[in-house]
Image (cartoon, rainbow, N blue to C red):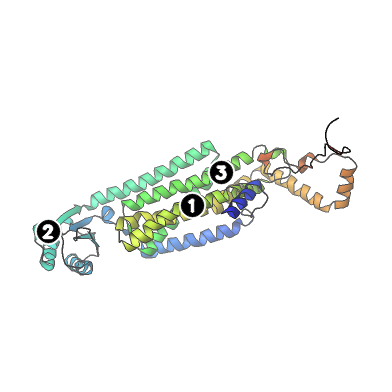
């Protein structure tokens, strides 16, 4: 842990770093590949929409000796549709059949009563009409659209429109991957899934805003110096917040993994699966997009500005001149007492540089004790 803390401090001070921006084409390629896979999974397998969205019926039985697999077979034979059966803590069963005509629920209930040996009046039936399910689905999409619009407006006001566009692309990236994973795994999409999606979008946005805030602070007065390009400072911002992003993501993933693999896997809790899978995939995708997608995209958009192009040209020209100048000439020039170029050091810490290393002054030179007389 101490090594990780030291690494985080060095990353923050700019003593070490990884070139995220320079390798952005690799990250773009990886993201495009993952996104295409998710879209193909969604197109081929589709989403397993829950009863709340498609309509149907849910039958709840009292305590019974019939197993879940047997009840599933009885329900599918009676309805002609796929059924989902869950064991309840009371010893009963919850039989969910989506996409059926609610008018046939009485016939299905009678067949279940006969096959399972349970009186019909002991089986509780909850019906969801298709129009109500369609309304719920539309409300979910409306809520997602409103969330996206508000995010873009807020980021455009708090930062700038380029950051708003980059954050929107990162959010769409996270949604696409999460929905694609749902299609590939075959988990049922319920209102719990929608709650999980909105939660991870908020978390992804938080992670992105942390990097954007650092970038905004470090690019103040960037045009007054010729040592750093916008991409250089964007890379510095990612490195300075990298350990923080990793720590917060890991801490958030641990309890979600407990819900998904222990609660959902071993305990068979369906609602936990609905929420925890979207949270688990979304949190990981959100951390990835804030580092590898959002900030590199901002750098690409910013460096298309004429003033950023001019700054980059000046920086590269100065670096080329410094590389061509012999080192001995530089040392001799400085030793002769000539002042250094002001641009050799950044204008301030916000320009992306670390602390300046100044030589220690020997105040006691020529005096054995170093004390004043």
Q: Nearer the viewer, mark 3 or mark 2?
A: 3
Name the residue tied to disc 1.
249
Give the percent coordinates (x, y) of residue 364: 84, 37
| Residue at image coords 48%, 54% | 250
Give how far apart the Cα atoms at labels 1 and 3 are: 17 Å
SS category of the residue bearing label 2: helix
SS category of the residue bearing label 3: helix
Q: Is residue 162 visible?
A: no
Q: Which mark is residue 106?
A: 2
Considering only order in the chain, which callout, 2 or 1, is on the residue closer to the N terminus?
2
Contact, CB < 8 Å: mark 1 with mark 3? no
**Mark 1 nearby-residue class (10 Å; few <14, some 14–19, many ≥20):** many
Q: Nearer the viewer, residue 96 or 253?
A: 253
Name the residue tied to disc 3.
212
Q: Nearer the viewer, residue 147 or 215?
A: 215
Residue 217 higher or lower than 60, as above or below? above
Quarter of the rendering containing residue 274: bottom left
**Mark 3 nearby-residue class (10 Å; few <14, some 14–19, many ≥20):** many
């Amino acid at each position: 842990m101490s090594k990780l803390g030291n690494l985080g401090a060095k990353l923050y001070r700019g003593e070490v770093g990884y070139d995220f921006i320079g390798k952005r084409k690799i990250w773009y390629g990886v993201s495009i590949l993952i996104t295409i896979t998710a879209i193909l999974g969604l197109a081929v397998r589709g989403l397993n929409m829950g009863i709340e969205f498609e309509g149907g019926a849910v039958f709840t039985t009292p305590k019974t000796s019939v197993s879940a697999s047997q009840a599933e077979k009885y329900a599918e034979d009676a309805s002609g549709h796929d059924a989902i059966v869950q064991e309840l803590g009371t010893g009963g069963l919850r039989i969910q059949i989506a996409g059926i005509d609610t008018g046939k629920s009485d016939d299905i209930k009678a067949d279940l009563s006969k096959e399972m040996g349970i009186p019909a009046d002991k089986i509780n039936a909850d019906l969801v009409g298709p129009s109500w399910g369609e309304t719920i689905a539309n409300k979910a999409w409306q809520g997602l659209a409103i969330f996206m619009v508000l995010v873009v407006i807020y980021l455009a006001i708090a930062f700038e429109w380029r950051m708003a566009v980059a954050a929107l692309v990162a959010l769409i990236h996270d949604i696409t991957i999460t929905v694609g994973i749902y299609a590939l795994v075959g988990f049922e999409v319920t209102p719990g899934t929608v709650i999980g999606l909105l939660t991870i979008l908020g978390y992804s946005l938080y992670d992105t805003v942390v990097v954007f805030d650092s970038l905004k602070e470090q690019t103040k007065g960037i045009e007054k110096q010729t040592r750093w390009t916008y991409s250089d400072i964007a890379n510095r911002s990612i490195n300075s917040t990298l350990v923080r992003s990793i720590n917060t993501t890991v801490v958030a993933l641990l309890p979600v993994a407990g819900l998904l693999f222990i609660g959902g896997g071993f305990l068979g809790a369906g609602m936990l699966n609905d929420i925890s899978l979207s949270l688990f995939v979304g949190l990981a995708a959100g951390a990835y997009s804030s580092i590898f997608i959002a900030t590199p995209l901002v750098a690409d958009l910013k460096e298309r500005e004429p003033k950023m192009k001019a700054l980059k040209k000046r920086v590269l020209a100065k670096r080329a001149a410094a590389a061509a100048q012999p080192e001995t000439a530089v040392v001799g020039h400085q030793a002769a007492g000539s002042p250094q170029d002001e641009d050799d050091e950044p204008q301030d810490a916000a320009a992306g540089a670390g602390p300046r290393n100044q030589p220690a002054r020997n105040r006691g030179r020529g005096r054995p004790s170093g004390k004043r007389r």
